[in-house]
Image (cartoon, grey):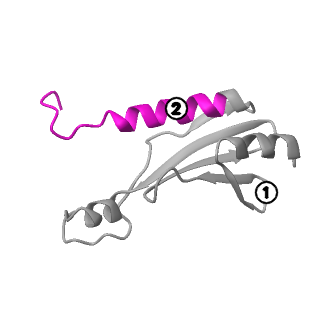
């Protein structure tokens, strides 16, 4: 499962190796900013792409609050993770799709 070429390829997208879990899954993280973390879980034959956005910390940083102002555990996640082929282009496409979607989020959009 440990493929140095694929690990180097992920690094070109900004992913860094974080850990290998007890089942052997390699986990990589990419942080385009201090609130968003994108994850790739490498199972050897396929990948799982997911992400998390620290919504509580983000709101606190701009003077907003959620509920009783408890910032910990206020994390935004996707409803479903994305299974991908073990292919750098697939990862790059998913990163681009996510970031494009997040960049279009407009809380003042009347169509919401």
Q: Is residue 91 magenta?
A: yes
Who comes first in sequence, dot 1 or dot 2?
Answer: 1
Q: State the residue position of label 1.
A: 23
Tell me which segment is drawn in magenta.
90-112
Residue 15 x, y percent position in the rendering: 66, 49
Residue 103 x, y percent position in the rendering: 36, 37
Q: How many marks?
A: 2
Q: For residue 3, say whether it is visible.
A: no
Picture residue at 87% right of the left edge, 49% below the top = 2
Q: State the residue position of label 2.
A: 96
**As drawn, is 91 to the left or to the right of 74?**
right
Give SS at disc 2. Answer: helix
Picture residue at 38% right of the left edge, 38% below the top = 102
Residue 30 x, y percent position in the rendering: 59, 51
* Label 1 – label 2 distance at C-alpha: 29 Å
**Prevalent SS, magenta region:** helix
């Amino acid at each position: 499962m440990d493929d140095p070429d694929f690990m180097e390829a992920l690094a070109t997208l900004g992913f860094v190796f974080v850990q290998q879990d007890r089942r052997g899954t390699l986990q990589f993280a990419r942080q385009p900013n201090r609130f968003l973390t994108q994850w790739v879980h490498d199972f050897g034959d396929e990948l799982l792409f997911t992400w998390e956005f620290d919504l509580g910390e983000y709101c606190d940083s701009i003077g907003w609050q959620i509920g009783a102002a408890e910032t910990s555990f206020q994390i935004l996640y996707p409803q479903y993770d994305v299974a991908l082929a073990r292919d750098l282009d697939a990862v790059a496409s998913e990163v681009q799709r996510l970031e494009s979607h997040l960049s279009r989020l407009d809380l003042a959009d009347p169509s919401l």
